[in-house]
Image: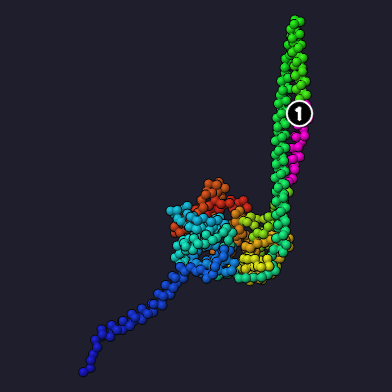
Amino acid sequence: MTRRTHPAAWRVPAFAGIALAVLFAALPAQAASRHARAERTAQETAPRAAGEPIMAIVSLARQRVTIYDKDGWILRAPVSSGVRGRETPAGVFAVIQKDKDHHSNLYDDASMPNMLRITWSGIALHGGPLPGHAASHGCVRMPYGFAEELFGETRLGMRVLIAPDHAAPVDIASPALFQPKPDAEARAKALADAAADAVKQADAAKSAAAIATREAAQASAALRKLEIAKKRADVRYAAADKVLEAATSDDAKARATLGQERAAADVADAQVQLDAATIAAQPKLDAVTSARAAAAAAEARRADAVKAAREAAPAAVSIFISRKTQHLYVRRGFKPVFDDAVVIRDPDQAIGTHVFTAVARNDDGTLRWTAVTIDGANDANSALARITIPPDVLDRFASAAAVRSSLIVSDEPLSNETGEGTEFVAVLSDAPQGGLAMRHHPSSRVHVARRRNDLATDGYGGSPNQPNRGFFGQPRPYDRPSPFFSSW
């Protein structure tokens, strides 16, 4: 007899097989998901001793930030940049303010710890939650622990590059990259010594002028007292003269005559003292004019000598070259010091945006440079080959260039974020700028004064759909009013 199998008997193993197949198929997907989550939260530290951070590069496409010292990367971490419509702007920035415990002035005083500000209008890097995708309102959120570690190691002026895609520094050697002159150190010392002497001479001249002024003041005070005494003697003589005129008896006339003679003697004595004091005071009064003139001349020499010494002293200098404006700009220490026209070959052709940084000094005293391309119409070497920097600019500003000096070449003009208290800021015009564009400019300086202490930047307390409501009141470029902006 043939044994029949109940339909349910074969359906159960079949269903079990299907379930197992689905389960096994799901395992790789779950593993991939776990791996993706791990990647989103992974932080890396270079397997070597780290130096001082020189540069931070944010990749918007990869949602990662990498920190570099002179020898390469030292820290990496995931980030969360701006959402659609409020995108973090891609471009060239630098840290211009640090705030360990920054809070928003909106949305329940939301915390943005370890803030590294890169624009006065409110873009910053700071600690915040990372959902694994762009989620901020223009800022770059970093893991809390990573942000704290970076905050402690970062100095003002550290370059921050925000790239649409991946970007990393590569070593570069080119005759177009400026180098300090061999005798720059000796020249700087000579000018520093001359400045020190000029300061001493100016101080001595100022002290001499102060002494001359004090002595002249004392002489003038003595003269005023003698002038007053002379006037009083004249008054007494005039009174005695009237008494004599009014006297009728011989006895009264005799007494009045004696009084008049005594008053006349007092007048004569007062005049003698006044004349002697005037003669004695005149050299002191004249000395004030010459002493003040000498002090002014010494102060002018001091100012010139100090300026020359400052320009010759080894220091980081930043040069920005814009193809858009055909102009070259120089900054030292967040301050503009020079700008002039520059020659760029084939000015109608894109050149890209490239940042060249002097990261270390070689044994022979020359600077070691790296290049980062964040917008690559040309490679870095080709971009340099198209530019001719005036020799006088190199002689004046690059002869004593130090580590952290930089040369930025870009198709873009300087952003209006470049101004008082900033390094150069250039924003890529072909990349979304929602997180910057939504920060409105003020209509009145009065508003700036009222909100000078409101240091709101992007945070995470609200929804991207919240209305624009934040303000900020920091100095703006070239004495323009500060921008208003929305925190969220």
Magenta segment's dominant SS is helix
Measured as percent of width and height from the top left, residue 94 is found at: 58, 60
Say which quadrant the N terminus sits in: bottom left
Left or right side of 31 for 200: right
Extreme-top residue of the structure: 249
Measured as percent of width and height from the top left, residue 153 is found at: 54, 61
Q: Is residue 46 above or below residue 280?
A: below
Q: Nearer the viewer, residue 296 or 423?
A: 296
Left or right side of 362 for 467: left
Q: Nearer the viewer, residue 85 or 106?
A: 106
Instruction: State which region is magenta.
Output: 275-299
Q: Residue at x 36, y 81 (%)?
A: 21
Extreme-bottom residue of the structure: 1
Q: Residue at x 72, y 34 (%)?
A: 216
Q: Quadrant of residue 169?
A: bottom right
Whether residue 155 appears in magenta in the rendering, the answer is no
Q: What SS does tag 1 mark?
A: helix
Q: Residue at x 74, y 37 (%)?
A: 288
> Please, what is the three-letter code of the amino acid marked with disc 1?
Ala
